[in-house]
Image (cartoon, coloured by chain):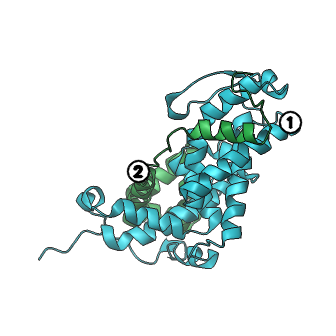
């Protein structure tokens, strides 16, 4: 980490790694205020640890998104509608509604 | 420095849409169902809701319980309860959010009943987070090899297993936020917790999954 950023962090003027890490979910979601976002990005540019961690964090999210393709059973909604009719929640006649 | 967040007008409990129609973009389908008709007990409108929401709701439920037959049974029970309790819907959220909350609660109850509990405890998830000393990383995280990330043949299974191992509270937010891509506020409304709590659980869950993936994704030393 560059000296100036490290000094700012030490003086409590800029976020440290732990603070950056704590707010990663907000950072990824883009819900941080502009000024805070700029401070986070400044830290990220200077800090190898946080940039590596961020890379892993984003890749983890990407891998989670593509982790599983659920196979939807055939006639899923039809089975539910039949169940509702069998339980007399719906009219017995399929064409009643 | 205290990180500040953007003001968010749509907090938990806010009414996010007009409330007159039930629309969904799940699986590319976007169909409007009259909320008034649903509230009046119109069977045809409810059938439309079943057809429209079944695939996505099934995906959420099956990811929580991990069993197709059980998920189908919970899906049916969800719609049964929704139809019978429609008069308790207070229009404080989207109808679909309310419907999914019913399904998620039933799925979680089923998990507890079947004692299909996760193998990780909350404390273990905590221990899987990075360590800091005086606010700085204790160890520099390793570089992940982009080729391994994309080419590692077992990565889907690895992530799936990792998600299965997560404690239920963490697993549910990962499924809803990262897999189904609901907004943080919608997840909060479905689970009846604050958006902040969703972000905290999500962050911990992602940190734990990252830790599980880490040994498999590291750049291999050149021989």
- Relative to A49, B88 lies left or right: right
Q: Residue furthest front?
A: A93
Is residue B166 visible in the rendered structure shown here?
yes
Q: Could you tell me which residue is drawn at 78 percent across and 41 percent down?
A: B82
**Placement of the C terminus of chain B among the 4 image quadrants:** bottom left
Does residue B65 sit above or below B95 in this rendering? Answer: below
Does residue B175 sit above or below B92 in this rendering? Answer: below
- Identify the residue under disc 1: B90
Colour of chain B in the image = cyan
In front here: B142 or B167?
A: B167
- Identify the residue under disc 2: A66
Q: Could you tell me which residue is drawn at 54 percent across and 72 percent down?
A: B135
Label 1 marks a residue whose chain is B
Residue B7 place in picture, x, y as percent = 70, 40
Q: Could you tell me which residue is drawn at 66 percent across and 65 percent down?
A: B111
Residue B222, by quadrant, is bottom left
Chain shown in green: A
Label 2: which secondary element = loop
Residue B117 place in picture, x, y as percent = 62, 72
**Placement of the N terminus of chain B among the 4 image quadrants:** bottom right
In front here: B184 or A53?
A: B184
Tag 2: Cα neighbours inside 10 Å, few (<14), some, or many (≥20)?
some
């Amino acid at each position: 980490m560059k000296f100036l950023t490290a000094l700012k962090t030490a003086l409590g003027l800029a976020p440290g790694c732990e603070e950056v890490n704590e707010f990663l979910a907000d950072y990824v979601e883009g819900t941080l205020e502009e000024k805070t976002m700029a401070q986070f990005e400044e830290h990220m540019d200077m800090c190898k640890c946080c940039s590596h961690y961020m890379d892993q964090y984003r890749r983890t999210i990407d891998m989670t998104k593509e982790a599983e393709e659920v196979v939807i059973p055939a006639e899923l909604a039809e089975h539910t509608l039949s169940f509702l009719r069998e339980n007399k929640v719906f009219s017995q006649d399929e064409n009643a509604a | 420095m205290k990180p500040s967040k953007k003001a968010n007008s749509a907090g938990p409990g806010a009414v996010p849409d007009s409330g007159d129609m039930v629309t969904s973009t799940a699986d590319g389908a976007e169909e409007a169902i009259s909320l008034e008709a649903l509230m009046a007990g119109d069977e045809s409108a409810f059938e439309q809701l079943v057809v429209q929401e079944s695939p996505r709701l099934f995906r959420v439920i099956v990811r929580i319980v991990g069993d197709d037959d059980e998920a189908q049974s919970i899906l049916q029970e969800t719609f049964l309860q929704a139809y019978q309790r429609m008069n308790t819907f207070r229009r404080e959220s989207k109808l679909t959010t309310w419907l999914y909350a019913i399904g998620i609660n039933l799925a979680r109850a089923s998990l507890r009943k079947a004692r299909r509990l996760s193998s990780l405890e909350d404390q273990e998830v905590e221990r899987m987070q990075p360590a800091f000393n005086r606010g700085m990383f204790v160890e520099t995280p390793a570089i992940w090899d982009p080729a391994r990330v994309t080419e590692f043949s077992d990565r889907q299974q690895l992530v799936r297993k990792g998600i299965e191992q997560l404690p239920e509270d963490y697993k549910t937010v990962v499924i809803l936020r990262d897999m189904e891509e609901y907004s943080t506020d919608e997840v909060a409304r479905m689970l009846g917790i604050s958006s902040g709590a969703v972000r905290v659980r999500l962050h911990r869950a992602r940190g734990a999954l990252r830790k599980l993936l880490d040994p498999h994704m590291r750049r291999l030393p050149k021989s």
